[in-house]
Image: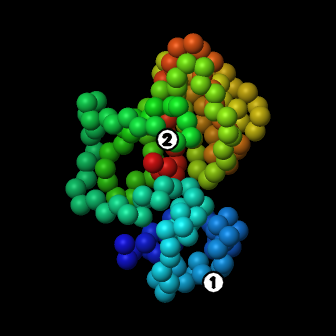
């Protein structure tokens, strides 16, 4: 836990954000953020959550121990599925385990007629490859209908959302930055 300030500063610099950018996004003062990054001030879980949201990562990142054992191969039977509180998609993490990874590869199953109701915009990049079915992506309100074998790659700063227009599930390979889960 004592290296949280180092992780915050490292992530901020990797994302080319200034303290002012983070301050504006979180509502926390510049001086407080500077103290946090120097390790001169402690912070509450609420403040840490605001910072993690501004940096585009899950708050759990700050509580994970640095991996001492690197693992590059994930076998098919080791994929663990999960959902988020904001959607009906089912995610399977495909990533290996090693320090300082930058990509978040996922297999995503979109249920029949799923339509994401809230558009998103954040730092990073997103790449999708349609493995099965069809997926409609909306980027800044522009519609892109993708079919099996199609790909899309865009900066996450675009306002984006997606849907499965079919009465059957669709499956995509997703590779995003920064790490979000």
Mark 1 and mark 2: Cα distance apart in space: 34 Å
Can the viewer see residue 91 in this picture? Answer: yes
Q: How crowded is mark 2: few (under 14 residues within 10 Å), some or many (20 or more)?
A: few
Question: Residue at (59%, 25%) from the top-left corner?
Answer: 114
**Image spot of residue 71 (x, y percent):** 25, 48
> Circle 2 sits in a helix, a strand or a loop, which is it?
loop
In this orientation, which residue lies closer to the viewer: 148 or 109? 109
Q: Where is residue 156 in the image (x, y as percent from the top left)?
A: 63, 46
Q: Specify the quadrant that holds the N terminus.
A: bottom left
The image quadrant that residue 77 belongs to is top left
> Which residue matches tag 2?
84
* Residue at the left extreme of this rendering: 69
Q: In this view, does 30 lie above or below 123?
A: below
Task: Tally the marks.
Answer: 2
Q: Which residue lies furthest to the right in this view?
A: 141
Which residue is painted at 55% across and 18% down in the image? Answer: 112
Where 136 sits versus 133, above or below?
below
The residue at which mark 1 appears reads as 31
Image spot of residue 86 (x, y percent): 56, 40
Quadrant in which residue 50 is drawn: bottom right
Q: Residue 53's spot in the image, x, y percent?
A: 57, 58
């Amino acid at each position: 836990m004592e290296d949280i300030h180092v992780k915050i500063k490292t992530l901020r610099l990797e994302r080319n954000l200034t303290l002012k950018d983070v301050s504006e996004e979180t509502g926390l003062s510049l001086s407080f953020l500077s103290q946090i990054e120097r390790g001169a001030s402690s912070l509450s879980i609420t403040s840490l959550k605001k910072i993690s949201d501004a940096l585009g990562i899950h708050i759990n990142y700050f509580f994970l121990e640095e991996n001492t054992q690197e693992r590059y191969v994930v076998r098919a039977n080791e994929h663990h599925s999960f959902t988020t509180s904001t959607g009906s998609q089912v995610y399977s993490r495909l990533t290996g385990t090693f320090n300082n990874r930058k990509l978040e590869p996922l297999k995503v199953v979109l249920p029949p007629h799923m339509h994401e109701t809230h558009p998103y915009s954040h730092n990073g990049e997103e790449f999708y490859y349609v493995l099965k079915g069809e997926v409609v992506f909306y980027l800044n309100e522009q519609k892109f209908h993708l079919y099996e074998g199609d790909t899309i790659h865009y900066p996450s700063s675009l306002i984006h959302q997606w849907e499965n227009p079919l009465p059957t599930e669709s499956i995509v390979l997703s590779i995003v930055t920064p790490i979000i889960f």
